[in-house]
Image: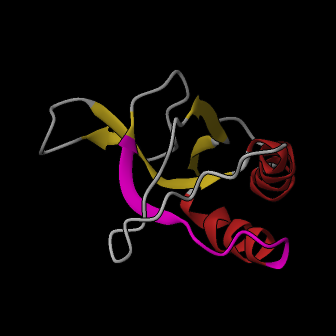
Amino acid sequence: MKEIKAFIKPNRIQRVIEALSDNGFKSMTLSQAEGTGAFKAKGARPSLDFHVTDSPVVKLELVCQNEEAQAAIETIIANAKTDGPGDGIIYIANIEDAFQIKTGESLKRFNS
């Protein structure tokens, strides 16, 4: 399984969520965040919480099967990309397993 973390401009997140959902990715987590990357958004200001210059971003997280990861990445890129700088970044990590809390069942599918 793969964990996908994407840091996306707030004005593109609705479009990304809808496209992912339309492509079968129904479960994801969204968090408001502040980015401190190389690109500084117009109007970026010192954060009162962290004392660094920030640009607002939305962190989208989802876990999918290995064979689904490329489709999720392509969907995010196609819908988050703009003509301007600072569109964000996507990180991919391997997930060993995941378990439903209610049932204790593993979500990992084995390919035989």
Q: Nearer the viewer, residue 69 or 78?
A: 69
Up the image or down, 49 lies above or below 23; here it is above
The quarter of the displayed image where residue 83 is located: top right
Query: Residue 12's spot in the image, x, y percent?
Result: 67, 63
Farthest front residue in view: 112
Q: Which residue is drawn at 76% across and 41% down?
A: 66
Is residue 18 among what the camera can see?
yes
Q: Nearer the viewer, residue 58 or 50?
A: 58
29 is within the stretch colored magenta: yes
Q: Which of 9 and 2 is in front in this view?
A: 2
Q: Which residue is drawn at 55% across and 28% down?
A: 39
Q: Number of labelled discs? A: 0
Query: Residue 70's spot in the image, x, y percent?
Result: 84, 42
Boundaries of the magenta span: 22-34
Q: How is the image coloured?
A: secondary structure
Q: In this view, does 53 lie to the left or right of 85?
A: left
Is residue 83 among what the camera can see?
no
Q: Quadrant of the C terminus?
A: top right
Q: Residue at x 52, y 35 (%)?
A: 96
Query: Residue 34's spot in the image, x, y percent?
Result: 36, 44
Up the image or down, 94 lies above or below 99; here it is above
Q: Which residue is drawn at 64% across and 42% down?
A: 1
Query: Residue 2's spot in the image, x, y percent?
Result: 64, 40
The quarter of the displayed image where residue 28 is located: bottom right
96 is within the stretch colored magenta: no
Up the image or down, 95 lies above or below 39; here it is below
